[in-house]
Amino acid sequence: MSKYLGPPSKIRRPDFLKTLDHPTGLELDIYYPQYGFATEVQGEQHKRYIEFFHGGDPNNFIKQQARDQLKKELCEENRIALRYWDHVS
């Protein structure tokens, strides 16, 4: 992607992703504000509970899903097209 668009922004936690519950901001994996889009690399831990990634607590998976949904909504509100790449290992 950077071959065609140049390097992504060094800002991975833009101000529009800061909330009262997430004061430091949610993070984007690859962000191109000048083009109005971002990419998230989604591993299996974003789709199902995995003990290793969720610290042995299924509630952490639910919280992760809520953060992912909030990030999607905030990007939409700020006219950032958020695209997902599935990470396959």
Image: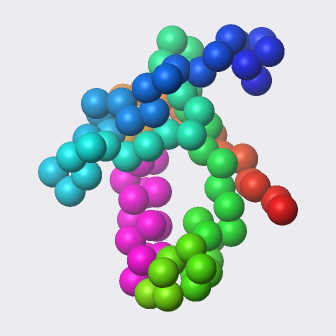
Image point (38%, 35%), residue name: 13
Position of 70 with respect to 29 (left or right) is left
- Residue farthest toward the left in the current orientation of the protein: 20
User: Secondary structure of the magenta portion, mostly?
Assistant: helix
Tell me the residue at 21%/46% (across/down).
23
Question: x, y (%) of residue 75?
Answer: 42, 37
* Residue at the spot 15% in from the left edge and 51% down from the top edge: 20
Question: Measured from the top left, where is residue 28 in percent x and y?
Answer: 50, 39
In the rendered image, residue 75 lying in the magenta stretch gets the answer: no
**17 horizontally vs 55: left or right:** left
Task: Please say whether residue 14 is visible from this viewpoint.
Answer: yes
Q: In this view, does 66 lie above or below 17?
A: below
- In the figure, 56 relative to 27: above or below? below
The residue lying toward the viewer, choosing from 78 and 85, is 85
Residue interval drawn in magenta: 59-72
- Picture quadrant of residue 66: bottom left
- Percent position of residue 71, x then y: 41, 48
Describe the colour scheme in one phrase.
rainbow
User: Does residue 60 belong to the magenta stretch?
Assistant: yes
Q: Quadrant of the C terminus?
A: bottom right
Q: Where is residue 30 in the image (x, y as percent from the top left)?
A: 59, 33
In this view, the residue farthest toward the right is: 89
Q: In this view, does 28 lie to the left or right of 26?
A: right
Q: Locate the N terminus and report the quarter of the image it occupies.
A: top right
Looking at the rendered structure, the number of numbered marks drawn on it comes to 0
Residue 25: which quarter of the image? top left
Which residue is nearer to you in this view: 29 or 35?
A: 29
> Is residue 76 at least partly visible in the picture?
no
Position of 4 relative to 75 (above/below):
above
